[in-house]
Image (cartoon, rainbow, N blue to C red):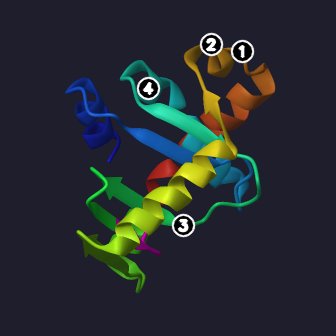
Amino acid sequence: MRTALAMASMRGIEVRLIVPEVSDGFLTQYGTRSYFSELLDYGVEIYMYRKGFLHQKIMIVDDDLATIGTANMDMRSLNLNFEVNMFLFQSKTVHDLVAAYQNDLNDSVSVTKDSYSKRGLKHRTKESFARLFSPVL
């Protein structure tokens, strides 16, 4: 997934991620953040959602196609758990999701290369530790 996002961004496609500022687990939160530098280097825009825990999994493509559901992009979700996503094509619901996404974006703060590089040693250490477990998160 990381490679696909980076390649899309390198081709000039606008790629934005919204992740919760506070996650539901230490390893998930810091494991996720350990990849920010790489994604930012490829031009992916990253935003931290500040109004609570954001658990939805939504992907919107060209305001015309969307997927929403429970599936995470990990081995457990894709191979072991019973999780589902719904795909919507040219539907009013896609436009509703776009509006909701815009609201979530307004409640988020942009993560820039500069702001990310200024995080402290404590955060860097937590990210390095959590990244060790990212293949199984």
Which of the labelled discs sits on residue 118, or is there none?
1
Q: In the image, residue 62 lies at what x, y percent?
A: 27, 50
Between 121 and 49, the residue placed more toward the observer is 49
Q: Give the mark, 4 or 1, whose residue is nearer the N terminus.
A: 4
Which of the labelled discs sits on residue 114, or is there none?
2
Mark nearer the viewer, 4 or 3: 3
As measured in the structure, the alpha-carbon distance from the residue carrying label 4 to the one carrying label 1 is 15 Å
Secondary element under disc 2, as helix, strand or loop, is: helix
Between 57 and 135, the residue placed more toward the observer is 57
What amino acid is found at the position of numbered circle 1 in the picture?
Answer: Lys
Q: Are marks 2 and 1 in contact (CB under 8 Å)?
A: yes
Residue 9 visible within the image: yes
Mark nearer the viewer, 1 or 3: 3
Q: Which residue is mark 3?
A: 56
Secondary element under disc 3, as helix, strand or loop, is: loop
Quarter-of-image position of residue 30? top right
Q: Which residue is mark 4?
A: 38
Residue located 50% across and 58% down the image: 99
Q: Is residue 95 left or right of residue 107?
A: left
Secondary element under disc 4, as helix, strand or loop, is: helix
Residue 73 visible within the image: no
Q: Is residue 118 above or below residue 59?
A: above
As measured in the structure, the alpha-carbon distance from the residue carrying label 4 to the one carrying label 3 is 23 Å
What amino acid is found at the position of numbered circle 3 in the picture?
Answer: Gln
Q: Are marks 1 and 3 in contact (CB under 8 Å)?
A: no
Q: In the image, residue 132 lies at what x, y percent?
A: 54, 43
Q: Give the mark, 4 or 3, whose residue is nearer the N terminus.
A: 4
Q: Is residue 55 above or below residue 42?
A: below
Q: Which residues are magenta?
A: 67-72
Q: Is residue 68 left or right of residue 19?
A: left
92 part of magenta stretch = no
Q: Is residue 115 above or below residue 71?
A: above
